[in-house]
């Protein structure tokens, strides 16, 4: 568990030393200005966190709703929409959204939410459906209301599966947020694309490694969260 | 009936218990023309059942799988809502009550036990009392008392999680949880079905001893006729659509099955099973003979056990003595022809014999 952040720090250090050993031209040194990188990193983190938080806020309640007996019949539709969001190439989705509602931060967030909804939605449904029916029956039989069964039995027992979905969605979002630059929403994608366009591999490498390290770090945070938030006893 | 035989564990609980945590007795359950029809099915799952269960009795609903016995039971706590008919507990029409609140006042034990794995044992047991608005202190005291009663020292078990307990221990907790708010009525759906035969036998005996102190009204569902004989004060043998084929005491059903269906359910060895229902404690013994080379049996055993000893030793009589192994004072002797007489006599005054023997003495 503790190995991952150490490794990531080592990668970043190596990158830093390597960049310092290069002679940078004016384009490179402008793009690699620490203050600029910090700002883009912050944009990237902001995009990812806001998008993931929104995704959770939408997908978990939707998953709960779709597993209630009265809503069983719309479950395939809900899952179908989630599949649709993920099946569209993410860059296409983001560009289409920009054409429709304009460029900027919130357009990027909407695209990321659409893209990451499926894993959380699916895991919420799988997690809730996986709760032993005998436990639900015991809970009902001892006089818990439907809401109490959901709150005290079903959701706590589904938490590990839901968190696994959140972790997947978080990593997807961090990785996909690099595309936000195409609709002027900032993030680490800008430097990466500039490196390709201006034929400066050092830029692509730097921003590519930063984005990857951030995604792996997010995955690690997700893993820690799974460990900490998993109810004891199961 | 309750509280006459305080054992050491419930005494220690009484010392700690503030408030009214002692067991209250049972309430009468009446099913009146209860029918359940599922939409889209040709016939009813439960067809017009009428059944009265006296306060403080264990009534076993026994029948093959799919006969509607579980459906019948679940209508009592309204996990399944009847299509028509009335269900009264202690004279109150339960179909008029709030279903969730009603269920809090009916103990419920299922075969899968259904302990919540993410809650500690104490939390599992305390759920219903807390829902009923008991204070934390009163709930904690009750949990401790119940853990003592089911033989799991609270100091050792209260803070464990269910997966840290064996199957038999979990089922004890399941029973404790159902008893937590001291409900007058308990429903038990094949509660010991998933345990191995030795554990099942022990759980059954413990439960009968407990019931001897509590006197709850209990509806017990099983497909195992031998379990029905052991547990039931009365047995309702159910046919398809939960139609009652016979509703009587175990020995009366064994002595005179109402029809071929009931006979087939009893299977072979019905008379031997009847002997198994007759405790030596209730038998009329002969004076013990002077010769002491006769096998000895404990008075806690049944006539069936006595027959077994006779067959094994090749003697036509056994000595009956006090003590769990028969090592105590000799009370008398019983002979093969006494056993035969018991079988033919018992059919005549069945009712009297049954009501004279409490649940404990079995």
Image (tube, rainbow, N blue to C red):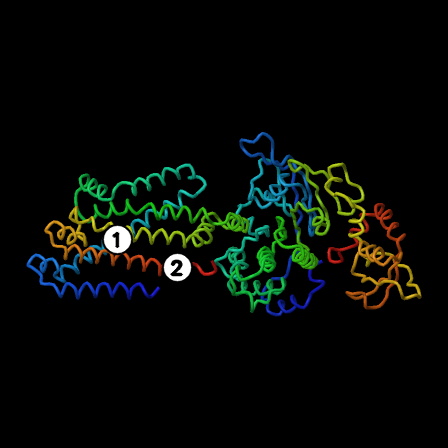
Residue ID at (33%, 57%) = A222
**Residue designated by label 2:** A229
Residue ID at (9%, 63%) = A23
Figure quadrant of residue B15: bottom right
Residues packed near mark 2 inside 10 Å, few (<14), some (14 to 19) or many (20 plus) = few
Figure quadrant of residue A213: bottom left
| Residue B26 x/y as whole percent | 66, 52
Front one among A175 and B55:
A175
Disc number lying in front (1 or 2):
1
**Residue designated by label 1:** A174
Classify B38 as above or below B132. above
Q: What chain does badge 2 belong to?
A: A
Front one among A92 and B226:
A92
| Residue A128 x/y as whole percent | 43, 48
Classify A103 as above or below B312. above
| Residue A155 x/y as whole percent | 43, 52
Residue ID at (63%, 53%) = B192
Q: Is residue A201 left or right of residue A142?
A: left
Q: Secondary structure at mark 2?
A: helix
Front one among B108 and B100:
B108
């Amino acid at each position: 568990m503790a190995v991952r952040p150490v490794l990531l720090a080592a990668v970043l250090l190596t990158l830093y030393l390597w960049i310092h050993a290069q002679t940078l031209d004016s384009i490179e040194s402008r793009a690699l200005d620490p203050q600029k990188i910090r700002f883009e990193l912050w944009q990237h983190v902001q995009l990812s966190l806001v998008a993931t938080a929104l995704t959770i806020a939408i997908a978990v309640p939707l998953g709960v709703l779709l597993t209630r007996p009265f809503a069983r019949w719309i479950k395939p539709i809900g899952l179908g929409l989630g599949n649709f969001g993920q099946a569209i190439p993410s860059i296409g989705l983001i560009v289409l959204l920009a054409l429709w509602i304009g460029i900027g931060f919130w357009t990027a967030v909407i695209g990321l939410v659409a893209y990451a909804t499926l894993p959380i939605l699916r895991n919420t449904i799988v997690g809730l459906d996986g709760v032993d029916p005998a436990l639900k029956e015991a809970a009902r039989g001892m006089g818990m209301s439907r809401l109490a069964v959901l709150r005290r039995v079903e959701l706590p027992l589904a938490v590990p599966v839901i968190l696994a979905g959140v972790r997947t969605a978080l990593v997807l979002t961090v990785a996909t947020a690099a595309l936000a630059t195409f609709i002027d929403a900032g993030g680490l994608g800008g430097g990466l694309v500039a490196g390709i366009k201006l034929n400066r591999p050092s830029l692509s490498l730097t921003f590519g490694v930063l984005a990857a390290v951030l995604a792996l770090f997010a995955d690690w945070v997700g893993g820690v969260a799974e460990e900490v938030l998993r109810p004891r006893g199961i | 009936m309750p509280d006459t035989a305080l054992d050491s564990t419930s005494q220690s609980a009484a010392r700690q218990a503030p408030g009214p945590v002692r067991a209250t007795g049972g309430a009468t359950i009446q099913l009146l023309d209860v029918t359940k029809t599922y939409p889209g099915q040709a016939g009813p799952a439960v067809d017009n059942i009428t059944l009265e269960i006296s306060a403080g009795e264990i009534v076993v609903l026994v029948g093959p799988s799919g006969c509607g016995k579980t459906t019948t039971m679940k209508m009592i706590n309204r996990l399944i809502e009847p299509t028509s008919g009335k269900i009264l507990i202690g004279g109150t029409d339960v179909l008029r009550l709030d279903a969730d609140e009603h269920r809090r006042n009916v103990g419920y034990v299922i075969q899968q036990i259904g302990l919540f794995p993410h809650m500690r044992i104490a939390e599992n047991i305390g759920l219903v009392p807390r829902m009923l608005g008991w204070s934390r202190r009163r709930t904690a005291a009750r949990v401790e008392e119940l853990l003592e009663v089911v033989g799991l020292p609270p100091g050792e078990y209260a803070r464990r999680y269910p997966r840290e307990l064996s199957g038999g221990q979990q089922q004890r907790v399941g029973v404790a949880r159902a008893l937590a708010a001291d409900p007058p009525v308990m429903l038990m759906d094949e509660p010991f079905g998933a345990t191995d035969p030795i554990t099942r036998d022990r759980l059954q005996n413990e439960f009968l001893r407990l019931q001897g102190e509590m006197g709850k009204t209990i509806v017990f569902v099983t497909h195992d006729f031998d379990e029905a004989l052991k547990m039931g004060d009365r047995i309702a043998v159910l046919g398809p659509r939960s139609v009652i084929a016979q509703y009587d005491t175990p020995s009366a059903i064994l002595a005179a099955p109402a029809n071929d269906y009931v006979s087939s359910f009893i299977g072979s060895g019905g008379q031997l099973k009847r002997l198994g229902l007759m405790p030596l404690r209730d038998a009329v013994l002969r004076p013990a003979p002077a010769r002491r080379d006769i096998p000895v049996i404990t008075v806690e055993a049944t006539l069936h056990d006595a027959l077994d000893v006779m067959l094994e030793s090749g003697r036509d009589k056994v000595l009956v003595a006090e003590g769990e192994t028969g090592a105590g004072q000799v009370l008398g002797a019983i002979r093969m022809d006494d056993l035969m007489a018991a079988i033919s006599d018992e059919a005549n005054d069945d009712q009297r014999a049954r009501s004279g023997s409490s649940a404990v003495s079995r």
